[in-house]
Image (spheres, rainbow, N blue to C red):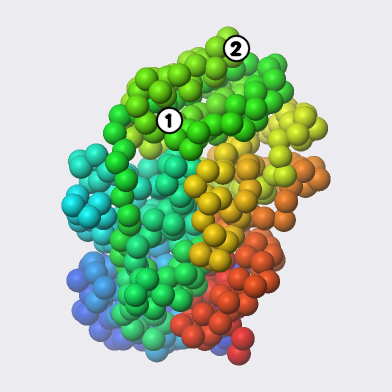
Amino acid sequence: MLEQEHTGQPSRGDTFAVLEQPSIETLKASLREELFQPGEAGYDAARSIYNAMIDRHPALIVRCAGVADVISAINFARTHGLLVAVRGGGHNVAGRAMCNGGLVIDLSRMKGIRVNPVTQTVRAEGGCTWGDLDRETQAFGLATTGGTVSTTGIAGLTLGGGLGWLMRQYGLSCDNLVCVDLVTAEGRFLTASASENADLLWGMRGAGANFGVATSFEYRLHPVGPLVGGMLIYPFAKANDVLRFYRDVTAGAPDEFTALAGLLSLPDGEPAVAIISCYNGPIEAGEEVMRPLRAFGPPLADQIGPMTYLQVQTMLDASFPAGVRNYWKTSFLKDLSDEAIETLVTYFRTVPSPLTVALIEQFGGAVGRVGQKETAFSPRDQRFNLGIVSRWTDPAESEKHRQWTREFWEVMQPFATEAVYVNYLAEDEDDRIKALYGAAKYDRLVRLKNTYDPTNFFQLNPNIKPIV
């Protein structure tokens, strides 16, 4: 028999479940895919996720082939009082895809995709990454907003909002979500759309991990052909000037243009500043929009040019590899004032790891034109988001890097708003959840939670707690 432990994890009770091996074997026999237990071949690989800081040991990992496997896993976990985590892409920095002592519902093998070029929609299962989805949709010259690193899962990104290169033109991933299939804590299969369980669709667009396991998503697609994009890298000595220039250029930018700015280290360890951009439109128009960026400098490197959307979606992949230790802190900024820029640059000079970056993400455009009441996602009226993405390899240095990140975040708080992007929350920031949705939306989300998950069965997420 196997005793589950809730070490360091939230729990729905104070008792430990005892799993009899015959019960586990019955569950295993009901599955089309695999089940992993501690000590078995494949278990350690199955519990590994993007952030190497996360080292959790679930009692069971159920790798699902389809909805029937998801239902079986949920019913087993509910019957045996097991804590449940849900894995899509496994990219979440807080490691919400894994738990200690509980059951992991792993969707990573559920990768079915069907594009309808006539209706310009796509249906994709919950284990798909954006790289999987983009490859299929681009075969028809179509795409939807989806992340900036192709290995990110579509499920987690969409359920928390979904930033990406196309968001200023076409809205967030959740804004393009037409309907979603999910399995509830009771093992019920539901569809949420504008015509069916519309209240649930509203909640899935920004707080969706709270209500069930999303097994498939249908998105609205848009024409996306060859475009202009790439990275410009400048010496760190010009960081203040570059970030002021970035602020001014993005202020009047068309919706087709999206740009990130980053403080980073070059391969030789020297700090630098970069602008990474994308223009989705005619190549000639994109080159004209990019002209001021390329003229500002001179840059250390100019990688701007025509490229496919698949190239745009993968151009940051090498900079964000899996298997290193991550700790992030994030806040939206009131603006990129000269004082805010000076503080950013000054503090980054003390960066303790060459893998760490400070990213500024541009918002606006179509993101801000969606009504505040239309989705659970809240920070619609922000202009810039700051992400302090600390990464390192030596486990012995973890506390040093976490402390540096917290201190950096603290010195930036005079320039920050109260808003935060839920997908970037670290594992120790659940106290920010209520504020990030605002009182009215949070109350509405609590009512949804009471309806669809009154026991808080799905709690390893940016958790909306039901009222018992």
Q: Is residue 197 visible?
A: yes
> Which residue is identified by label 2?
297
What separation in Å lies between label 1 and label 2 (alpha carbons)?
20 Å
Residue 170 in the image, given as x and y percentages of width and height: 42, 47
**Looking at the rendering, which quadrant does residue 414 occupy?**
top right
The reply to whether dot 1 and dot 2 touch (C-beta < 8 Å) is: no
Residue 455 in the image, given as x and y percentages of width and height: 52, 86
Front residue of 206 and 394: 206
Tell which residue pokes out farthest to the top in this image.
Answer: 298
Number of numbered discs: 2
> Which residue is identified by label 1?
279
Viewport quadrant of the N terminus: bottom left
**Looking at the rendering, which quadrant does residue 345 occupy?**
top right
Image height of 435 relative to 148, above or below: below
Label 2 secondary element? loop
**Residue at the image position 71 percent from the left and 39 percent from the top:** 335
Question: Are there few (<14), some (14-19), or many (20+) residues within 10 Å of tag 2?
Answer: some
Mark nearest the camera among 1 and 2 is: 1
Viewport quadrant of the C terminus: bottom right
Residue 20 in the image, given as x and y percentages of width and height: 36, 86
The amino acid marked with disc number 1 is Tyr
Answer with mark 1 or mark 2, whichever residue precedes in sequence: 1
Image height of 234 relative to 30, above or below: above
Residue 42 in the image, given as x and y percentages of width and height: 31, 59
Q: Is residue 113 left or right of residue 201?
A: left
**Residue at the image position 35 percent from the left and 48 percent from the top:** 144
The amino acid marked with disc number 2 is Gly
